[in-house]
Image (cartoon, grey):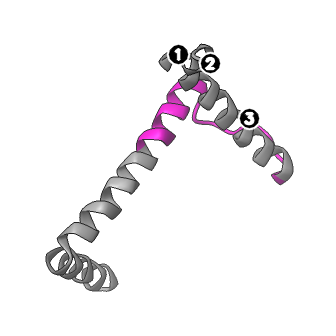
Amino acid sequence: MEHRVNYNKLVFFAKQFPQRFAALTAKRNHAETVFSMIGNLFGHRVRCRKSDARENEVRCKLIMFNLHQMAVTGLAWSQ
């Protein structure tokens, strides 16, 4: 029944504070979209075994994604 209580709290928050709820869900949707784009471009799997190596692999994917977005939008050559 824990999930029902959490859902009721979520519905209450959405009804009481619609602007805040919309802002929070917009941020979440944006983050999930970016994670999906990174996974589609560079693979959803993290291949390294050690935690430091996994963090480095994820950071590299983020850097490559940022460079990709700059290249697609033309920001890299606009200066």
Whichever of labels 2 and 1 marks the residue nearer the N terminus, that label is: 1
Disc nearest the viewer among 3 and 2: 2
Q: Secondary structure at mark 2?
A: loop
User: Residue 1 location in percent, x, y?
Assistant: 29, 86
72 is higher (above) or lower (below) than 40: above
Q: Residue furthest left?
A: 15
Task: Determine if the magenta segment contains residue 47.
Answer: yes
According to the picture, the residue beneath numbered tag 2 turns out to be 79
Residue 60's place in the image compared with 49, above or below, is above
Res. 71 image quadrant: top right
Dot 1 amino acid type? Gly
Tell me the mark number nearer the camera, choosing from 2 and 1.
2
Q: Is residue 25 above or below residue 8?
A: above
The residue at 76%/38% (across/down) is 57
Element type at mark 3: helix
Q: Amino acid at mark 2?
A: Gln
N-terminal of the two: label 3 or label 1? 3
Mark 3 or mark 2, earlier in chain: 3
Q: According to the image, label 1 marks what residue?
A: 74
User: How far is the residue under mark 3 from the one under mark 1?
Assistant: 21 Å
- For the residue carrying disc 1, how many other residues have a C-alpha within 10 Å: few (<14), some (14-19), or many (20+)? few
Picture coordinates of residue 3, whole percent (x, y): 31, 79
Residue receiving disc 3: 60
> Which stretch did the figure color magenta?
33-51
Q: Position of residue 31 (x, y in %)?
A: 45, 48
Q: Is residue 39 on the magenta stretch? A: yes
Per the image, label 1 sits on a secondary structure element best described as loop
Q: Quadrant of the C terminus?
A: top right
Using the image as rendered, state which of residue 45 and residue 72 is in the foreground.
Answer: 72
Q: How many marks?
A: 3
